[in-house]
Amino acid sequence: MNTPSPVFVQSLVPSPLGTLRLLAGPAGLAGVWFVEQQRHAPDPERIAGWTRVSQHPVLDEARRQLDAYFNGRIERFDLPLDLTQGTPFQRLVWQGLLDIPRGQTTSYLALAQRIGRPAAVRAVGAAVGRNPLSIVVPCHRVLGSDGALTGYAGGLPRKRALLALEAAAPADRHQSPPDSSSMRPRPAARTTAH
């Protein structure tokens, strides 16, 4: 007997860095992508198969928490996440990303070591790059071993803006997020991963 494929619903929401496509499945939030994402965006045929909704409990809560994140009111997201679309190794890496606190960064090597796969740095980089939950699963907090800003599927200007937003001192948390006009996607200088 064939198991029916899960039903996914989507909505588009504005953010200071561009419109986000949110995706929810039966187990929770399954995707957060910039609509104008540079790499690893969902295939248009897949997007066409996702029902567009104006209201959904998981998507509504994700929208609320993303707004709070961009306005400095929350440190971590508290959402049910559906990571089942990834391989077991990818899910291990994505879980490792969730352990990187706001305002801190790590390297691909340190992340590989943290998840117990120190020889798999390239595979870790590839898994970080395939993270389907931008911002919520903070792949933007991973830098090159030399501290260089490396690739990000949403574009390096967005990665830079997210890191700047998170580095704000507590007294500055109520300032407006960075102006999105300076965050136009440009070709990335380096292309490794998120």
Image (cartoon, helix red, strand yellow):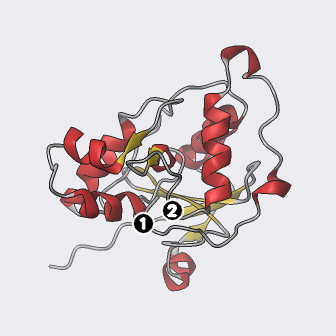
Q: Residues within 10 Å of mark 2 (few under 14, many from 20)?
A: many
Determine the secondary structure under disc 1: loop
**Picture residue at 59% right of the left edge, 50% below the top:** 56
**Picture residue at 46% right of the left edge, 38% below the top:** 79
Determine the secondary structure under disc 2: loop
Q: Earlier in the sequence, mark 2 or mark 1?
A: 2
Type of amino acid under label 2: Gly
- Residue 157's quadrant in the figure? bottom right
Q: Which of 184 and 174 is in front in this view?
A: 184
Q: Can residue 142 be seen in this view?
A: yes
Q: Residues within 10 Å of mark 1 (few under 14, many from 20)?
A: some
**Picture residue at 64% right of the left edge, 73% below the top:** 187
In this rendering, position of residue 14 left or right of residue 112: right
- Label ID, residue 17: none
The image position of residue 52, as x and y in percent, is 63, 67
- Residue 115's quadrant in the figure? top left
The image position of residue 180, as x and y in percent, is 80, 52
Q: Which of 55 and 45 is in front in this view?
A: 45
**Picture residue at 23% right of the left edge, 63% below the top:** 87
The image position of residue 46, as x and y in percent, is 48, 79
Q: Do the residues labelled 2 and 1 touch (CB within 8 Å)?
A: yes
In this rendering, position of residue 185 left or right of residue 121: right
- Label ID, residue 192: 1
Query: Is 125 rendered above or below residue 107?
Result: below
Query: Is 92 rendered above or below residue 66?
Result: below
The image position of residue 36, as x and y in percent, is 67, 70
Query: Is 145 rendered above or below residue 131?
Result: above
| C-alpha separation, residue under disc 2 versus residue under disc 1 | 5 Å
Type of amino acid under label 1: Thr
Location of mark 2 (residue): 151
Where is the N terminus found, in terms of image quarters? bottom left
